[in-house]
Image: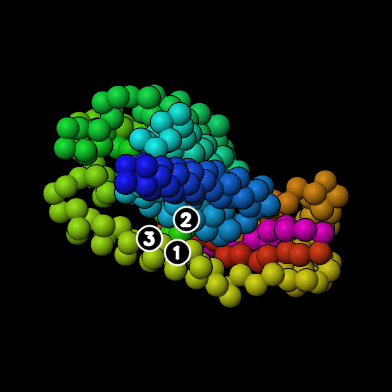
Amino acid sequence: MSKEKNIKTYELFKQDRFLGILVHLLTGLGIVAGFFALIAVMNNNQKAAFLWLGFAFLIDSVDGTLARKFNVKKNLPHIDGKMLDSIIDFFNYVIIPSVMIYWFRYVPDQFILLIPVILIFISIYSYVNLNILTNDNYYNGFPAIWNVIVLYFYIFGTSQNFNLIFLILLILLKFSPLKCIHPLRVKKFKSLSIIFAIFWFITSILLILIKDLNTNPVYEVSLYELLNQYDKELPDFEMAQYIIDHEEWNSTLVLSREEMDDSIQGKIIRFMSKEKFRVESYVHKDTIG
């Protein structure tokens, strides 16, 4: 009887270890998703990058709950799940958004390197701060969720100056006594927080999917035809040809410009490949002085 009980206990132990391995593999998929997001950034595909980051965020939202459910820490004590999770989070929540701020020029050129460097620098100490969470599991200061902030820049198409001011404010709030809720750890209103987090995630994915839907069609016509439509002159043709010859994809060229009372509006051409160009509208809301 005792032998059968030991065999049964051993089988359950093996099953729990197997489930623990699966949970760790699921966590590891988060950095794979982040890698694909980085590739999308290099390919100038913001939509795909944010969708991959969304997939990584989804994994990060459930793997901790699964790890506690299957007692992974006890069954696989030689693997530090917390360290694994922190490495992946730092890559997806800090490194990739910082690269996106630089790559897609979310802030003015004078700050294009400084802001990402500051975000990375302060965030790394945030990750090693043992007091980053309060006793009731609130974040001390603004948490390092720069992926969410950059997502809003993308969805709302905010200006470079607005992005810069907003990021500076959040950087300052990181060192403030502000308490930010962790939706999965703070016990007070936890159910409501989880419902709100699910709603936010679904709506964010939908906003990413419909962003610029059919508003900026890709033109597969000759460069000569496209520039002729906007009566561009020889220097513009030479600049466009230079961009194509040097394969500086995601570069832009102004097609039209109109000064209004409180803004500058017009259209630009975005170079995607030798054969594909995207015409986009732009509005600079800064006051013309």
Give residue 78's position: percent from left, percent from top: 45, 29
Specify whether residue 193 is painted magenta.
Answer: no
| Inter-mark Cα distance, 1 to 2 | 7 Å
**Quarter of the image holding residue 136?**
top left
Give residue 188's position: percent from left, percent from top: 13, 49
Numbered badge on residue 201:
3
Q: Earlier in the sequence, mark 2 or mark 3?
A: 2
Give residue 156's position: percent from left, percent from top: 43, 59
Mark 2 — residue? Answer: 54
Specify whether residue 273 is painted magenta.
Answer: yes
State the extent of the magenta-drawn residues as a range: 264-274
**Residue at (19% x, 59% y) in the render:** 192
Q: With respect to residue 202, does 194 lie above or below?
A: above
Residue situated in front as seen by the camera: 153 or 282: 153
What amino acid type is highlighted by mark number 1? Answer: Ile
Q: With respect to residue 143, does 158 lie above or below?
A: below
What amino acid type is highlighted by mark number 2? Answer: Gly
- Describe residue 74's horizontal placement relative to residue 47 as left or right: left
Numbered badge on residue 61:
none
| Inter-mark Cα distance, 2 to 3 | 8 Å
Secondary structure under badge 3? helix
Secondary structure under badge 1? helix
Q: Can residue 98 be seen at all in this image of the molecule?
A: no
**Residue farthest to the front?**
1
- Asked whether disc 2 touches disc 3, contact meaning CB atoms under 8 Å apart, the reply is yes
Mark 1 — residue? Answer: 205
The structure's colour scheme is rainbow
Q: Can residue 35 be seen at all in this image of the molecule?
A: yes
Task: Tell me how many marks there are.
Answer: 3
What amino acid type is highlighted by mark number 3? Answer: Phe
- Asked whether disc 1 touches disc 3, contact meaning CB atoms under 8 Å apart, the reply is yes
